[in-house]
Structure formats: C-alpha cells, structure tokens
Amino acid sequence: MRSARKTEIKYLIKNCFACIFFLPSAHIFRFKICLLLTYENQLITKTEIMKTKKILAFALLAGFLSTGYSFGQENQRANLGYDRFSIGLELGLFSPFGDVREWRYVPTPDELSFGGGFSLNYSLSPALTLRSQFLLGSLKGNDREEGFRFESNFLDANLQGLVSFTKLFVPRWEGNTRFDLYGGLGLGIVSYRTLLYRNNVLHREVGYSGGGTVKEPRSVDLNIPLSMGIRYNVSPRMDVFVETSFRFSRTDDLDGLDRPFSQNDAYNFSRVGLAIKLGPNRQALSWASPSTMMYPGDVARMDEISNRLGAVERRVTEVDRVAAVDAQGKELQALRNQVQTIQQRQDEMNKNVTYLMENHVKPEEYLVSVASLLNVYFRLNSAEINSFNYERIAAAARFLNVNPNLRLEVIGHTDISGPSAFNMALSERRARAVYNVLVRDFNVDPARLQVSFRGEDHPFADPALRINRRVEFRVIE
C-alpha cells in the first residue's frame, strides 16, 4: 500500500510539471481527474495531496521566473553598463484577514501591528525585476462578538516578480525615469507561532506547548504575495517607495481558529521604504529608458526613419526656397515691365498735355481719367510704398505740376483676399500713404488732392488678381 502511494505521488508530480511546460489545458484536466480518482480510492491521504499542491505551486513560480529570465536574457546586450542590484529597507503595518477580526474588510486600530524587513532586488529589464523579501512581524485580532482574540508572530520569506505598468504600457513617457507604478506576484513561506484566546482563556496554541510557555518548532506553510506600489527616483543611488501587499497563506491556522468551511487566512502589509542601488555605474537598469532598453531594434529603426524624414524635409525646404526665389524674380521682372510700360505711357501723356496746353484746350476737353496710366500697386495686405511705387507717384506729381488748374482724387483699392471690413481699412491706408508722399515729398498742395477708398468693391480685373491691389488717380475739377 505504501509503495502504491509513492508511485501515485510520483505520477502526479510528473503530470504537474508536464502541464506547466508542455500541454497546459490537457494535462491540468488529466491531473484533476487523476487526483480525484486516487483520493476516492484512498491511494493517497489529504496531507499528501497538500504536499502535491505545494509542489505544483513551486513549479508554477519556476515557470514564471524562467520566463522572466529568458526575457531579460534577450535584452542583456542592450542592458550593459547599468546597475542591476539594489537593497530595500521597509517598515510598515501588518493587519489580519482571517477568522478572528472585528470587521470583515477593514481592520480596527488595535488590530494593527508594526513590522519590517528587507529585500534584495535584481533587474532583468527596465520593466521586470525579481525580488527576494524577508519580513519579521506580528499579527493580532479580536472577535468581541464570540470572545476570540489571537496573537501571532511570524517570519515571511518570498520571491516575487515585479512588473512596471508605466514602462510596459507607456514606454515613451518622459516620467519613466523618475516615477514608477508596479505590481508583483510571487510565492513564499510563512513560519509562525500563534496563541488563541477565548474570553481571555487560552483556547489553542500553535508552535507552543505548556500553556504558551514552551516554544515548539514553528509551523510552516506556503503563502502567495500579491503587491502593488509606487516608487520615486530620488537620486542615482536611492529610491523611495510606498507599497501594499496581501499575503494569501495556504493554512487556516495562522490565527489559531480553524472553522468549518472557512477560507485560508491572509494578512496585509502596507509600508514605506528605501531602495539603495548597488553597483559601479551609478545608473540603475530599473530607471533606464524602456523604449531604448526593451525594444532596441524598434528604436534603431525609428531613428533611421526619423533621419530619412529629416533629410526629405530638408530637401523639400530647399526646393521651396529655390522655387520662392524663382517666383520672386519673375514677379520683380513683371513689375519692372509694368513700370516701363507706365513710364512710356506717362511720357506720351506729357507730350499730349503739352500740345493741348499750347493750343489752349481746356482740361475737361482733353482728359477725364488717368487711372490706366498712374496706378500704384501694392503687395498682399501691405500699404508700403517701394521704389517702383515712388516713381509712379512722382509721375502723378509731374502731371499736377504741368496742369496747375487740375485736382486729383486718390482712390485706394484691394483684392478679395481678406474680409470686407479689413479690405476697406486697407484701401484707406493705401490711399493715405500715396497722399502723404505727394504732400510731403513733392510739395503738392493738399487742397489739390482728395482721398477716397473703396475696398474690394471696384476691381480693375478679376477680383482675385493682384492687379486690384492698387491706388488710382482720377482728375476732378
């Protein structure tokens, strides 16, 4: 019978490792069926089943850690030159979550007890860290309704894998070098002694004898730590962190009370701590840029793409610059041609005026408008007078000098490129600018000038053409 039990336990352990490393769903189903049949046939005891579960839990943790180690090995070359080890010192409060407590979800102040510990951390990558943790503390709880209270002291040792959520999900966030939100899961053992009282009378003792006066070997059970915390990089050698974790033990004796159908006991440890980084490099791998360290190939490709885009952008800028220079040159040449044409027409008009004056013809008989001869043109949204405009205004001044009995209306216009109100104001500024040049530079009597402005309402040609950005002169009596 004993040989049959050993054979069955070996068979179960073999299936445990097979379900982890080969065909998970099929072998887990096979493991459960085999466990049920052997238990029904009484080939193994309940204690042996618990031992098998512990072996299965260790196997699961080994699979998790081996996966993390493989992930870290893939990035080992990129992680050179960074410190990986650190030591953590922590102090906080323990609170029980078992059968003996006052409230269901929240501990009372007298159920809190101080404790602390230390940890050794090893970074596999910026987002994944292995932590071995050792805690020393005590638990106490009260159930005043039933008269129970317990006191327990324990040692906790565990191994956890910590995952950085910020580095994993937002690897390009700039705050990854200073701030970290992380979670952890692992496996450990808890070694404890407990005294349970009912109505202030010793009811049960675990790890003690003789009414709690003689210490016996501690009880040892598995626990599963589940952690969540935040940490901040204070300096190249030091971090501060705040963390809370629940320890789910695989026993119902941690508080000394084993009730029928009750769940296993658990406890919480909330603490603050310091992490001191070790190594010669003064730069920890846990605070390295995750996008560079975890995905070096992707970053290199992105850098190459960025460089190519930069080169294309520079070429486009150069092409635009050359095109702008060419367009400006063409525009200047067109303006020169217009100035030359206007000057030729002005010379012809001067000859005609001289002829008419010599023959004593009245002004209204020979000239009504000179808008086509003396227009002054402007750039987009501008009322600035350049050298070409100055020559046209000078032509208008000469016209007034040879016709002392005439007056000119200075009329400003725009194209349709802007709002109507803006265009009306712009046309006024253009007319005023020409008026000021005539009065200031050519000493024209202001009484011989009249300023008008019409905005975009009277285009000379197609309303969108730049030729409409003009000031024209009209003869008035």
Image (cartoon, rainbow, N blue to C red):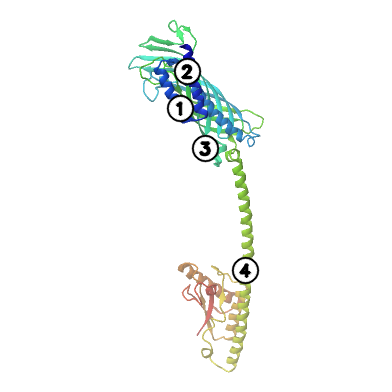
Horizontally, residue 464 falls left or right of residue 314, namely left
Q: Are marks 3 and 2 in contact (CB under 8 Å)?
A: no
Under mark 3, the amino acid is Thr
- Of callouts 4 and 1, the N-terminal one: 1
Q: Please name the residue shown 45% across and 18% down the image.
A: 50
Label annotation for residue 328: 4
Which of 251 and 14 lies nearest the eye of the viewer? 14
SS label for mark 4 = helix
For the residues labelled 3 and 4, the Cα–Cα distance comes to 53 Å
Q: Which corner quadrant holds the N terminus?
A: top left
Under mark 2, the amino acid is Glu
Label annotation for residue 28: 1
SS label for mark 2 = helix
Label annotation for residue 8: 2
Under mark 1, the amino acid is Ile
Q: Are marks 2 and 1 in contact (CB under 8 Å)?
A: no
Q: How packed is label 4: few (under 14 Cα within 10 Å), some, or many (20 or more)?
A: few
